[in-house]
Image (cartoon, rainbow, N blue to C red):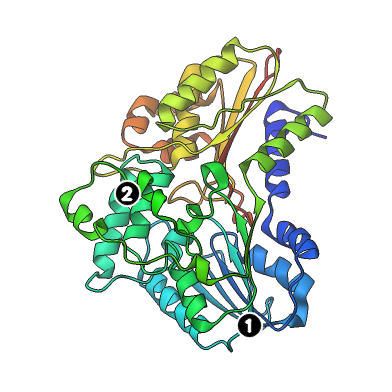
């Protein structure tokens, strides 16, 4: 039983993570969508290890071969997944291993016997982890494009629209390869990290593409990036996979409802805010903190994905850490409010921290260390500040990825 406001928020956060854990969600999905062996499995994303583990729990020896592509450090312990080749690649910026993963994935499909059943397990992070470039494009071009996109403050739908344009595997490219191979039944189980749970946006849509998604293309791109994005490299072949079935097995709503339920089970009044968080992380953090100060005692639950426009030389941190530190500015001196902002994949931006848990003493502790919160926010260096104050949350890989959660508690008494 949680004994303090901070431990209560961590308890609710853990409940959210458990509700969308990849292994459990795949096991539950496969009970109702059983594939007949032999099956070839592909798992791509930050939750790939957990998802593929769940598939082996259900299908066992029916999986004749599997390819797992995930973030560096997110792979399974050696020997835990039989008949599986694992490639760890770069995230959030692709690296040479991302290109090796794309080449290996296409060859893995091309060498399968026609008519094979396929299990495709996809989660957030796939856009960076696996890539097949159009003719003439080099890794340095891809990295430059991704670095610009990540620093731009664009919404994920816009970022992935550009990524689809400069790829042979996104935007239906994997579907095209499966169709050429003569695949049989294809079951795609997806953990969604995008608003609306659109399969064409999750992982930049390797199995799904429709022309109307061009509506997500940003209006203003640098000339050098516009030149690469001007032509769609891959064409949709979804229609060539008549036995394709796509199931969203976990999303943000599932995580948020679990957090809310954990609060209700502890007897708290819970307010789940339906609007998705978006826009600048710091401005959002300040707004949420002001809402908390004016609210009645209870647990507040939000979720979504904010953005950070990075300076030329950014510091350390991610959008959840930026949001949390900005909220701490507003909560400075407050004795009854605590706020948690964290990613659900265990990694907030290019850091090892999942996020942060702040309260009315965070800024005071920072001042005692000679730190300046406003300066840290301007430099996108919230992570360094929150590490010094002891407010970072470190979970390690969670086996999921459904965007970010923000949980806040107003207790009505001093914390």
Sequence-wise first label, 2 or 1: 1
Q: Eyeballing the image, is 204 above or below 38?
A: above
Could you tell me residue 214's position as x and y percent? Answer: 36, 49
In the displayed structure, does residue 265 sit left or right of residue 278? right
Callout 2 crowding tier (Cα within 10 Å): few <14, some 14–19, many ≥20: many
Q: Eyeballing the image, is 182 above or below 155?
A: below
What residue appears at the point 37 percent right and 31 percent down from the top-left corner?
A: 377
Question: Count the marks: how many?
Answer: 2
In which quadrant is the N terminus drawn?
top right
Using the numbered discs, state the Cα–Cα distance from disc 2 to disc 1 in whole angstroms. 37 Å
Could you tell me residue 75's position as x and y percent? Answer: 57, 69
What residue appears at the point 35 percent right and 41 percent down from the top-left corner?
A: 154
- Image quadrant in which you'd find residue 4: top right
Q: Eyeballing the image, is 184 above or below 207?
A: below
Judging depth in this view, the residue of 181 and 375 nearest the camera is 181
Judging depth in this view, the residue of 64 and 179 nearest the camera is 179
Judging depth in this view, the residue of 167 and 11 nearest the camera is 167
In the displayed structure, does residue 13 sit left or right of residue 231? right
Could you tell me residue 267's position as x and y percent? Answer: 83, 24
What residue appears at the point 46 percent right and 84 percent down from the top-left corner?
A: 107
In the displayed structure, does residue 225 sit left or right of residue 74? left
Q: Which residue is mark 1?
A: 116
Q: Which residue is mark 2?
A: 149
């Amino acid at each position: 039983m949680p004994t303090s406001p901070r431990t209560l928020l961590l308890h609710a956060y853990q409940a959210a993570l458990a509700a969308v854990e990849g292994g459990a969600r795949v096991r539950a999905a496969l009970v109702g969508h059983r594939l007949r062996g032999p099956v070839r499995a592909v798992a791509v994303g930050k939750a790939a290890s957990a998802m593929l583990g769940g598939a082996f729990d259900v299908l066992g020896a029916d999986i004749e071969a599997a390819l797992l592509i995930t973030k560096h450090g997110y792979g399974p312990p050696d020997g835990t997944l039989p008949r599986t080749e694992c490639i760890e690649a770069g995230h959030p910026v692709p690296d040479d291993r991302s290109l090796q993963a794309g080449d290996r994935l296409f060859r893995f499909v091309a060498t399968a016997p026609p008519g094979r059943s396929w299990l495709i397990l996809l989660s957030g992070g796939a856009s960076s982890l696996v890539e097949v470039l159009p003719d003439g494009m080099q890794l340095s071009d891809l990295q430059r494009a991704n670095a610009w996109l990540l620093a731009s403050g664009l919404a994920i739908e816009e970022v992935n629209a550009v990524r689809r344009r400069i790829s042979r595997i996104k935007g239906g490219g994997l579907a095209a390869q499966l169709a050429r191979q003569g695949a049989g039944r294809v079951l795609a189980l997806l953990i969604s990290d995008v608003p609306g749970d659109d399969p064409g946006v999750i992982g930049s849509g390797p199995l799904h593409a429709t022309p109307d998604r061009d509506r997500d293309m940003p209006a203003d791109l640098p000339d050098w990036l516009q030149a690469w994005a001007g032509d769609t490299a891959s064409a949709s072949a979804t229609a060539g996979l008549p036995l394709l079935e796509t199931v969203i097995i976990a999303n943000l709503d599932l995580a948020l409802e679990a957090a809310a339920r954990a609060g209700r089970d502890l007897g708290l009044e819970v307010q789940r805010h339906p609007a998705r968080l978006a826009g600048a992380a710091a401005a959002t953090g300040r707004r949420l903190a002001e809402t908390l100060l004016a609210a009645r005692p209870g647990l507040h639950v939000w979720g979504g994905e904010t953005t950070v426009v990075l300076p030329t030389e950014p510091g350390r941190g991610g959008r959840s850490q930026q949001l949390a530190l900005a909220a701490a500015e507003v909560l400075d001196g407050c004795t009854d409010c605590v706020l948690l902002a964290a990613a659900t994949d265990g990694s907030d931006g290019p850091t090892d921290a999942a996020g942060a848990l702040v309260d009315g003493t965070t800024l005071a502790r920072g001042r005692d260390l000679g730190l300046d919160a406003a300066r840290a926010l301007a430099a996108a260096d919230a992570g360094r500040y929150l590490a010094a104050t002891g407010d970072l949350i470190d979970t390690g890989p969670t086996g999921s990825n459904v965007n970010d959660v923000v949980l806040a508690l107003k207790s009505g008494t001093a914390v």
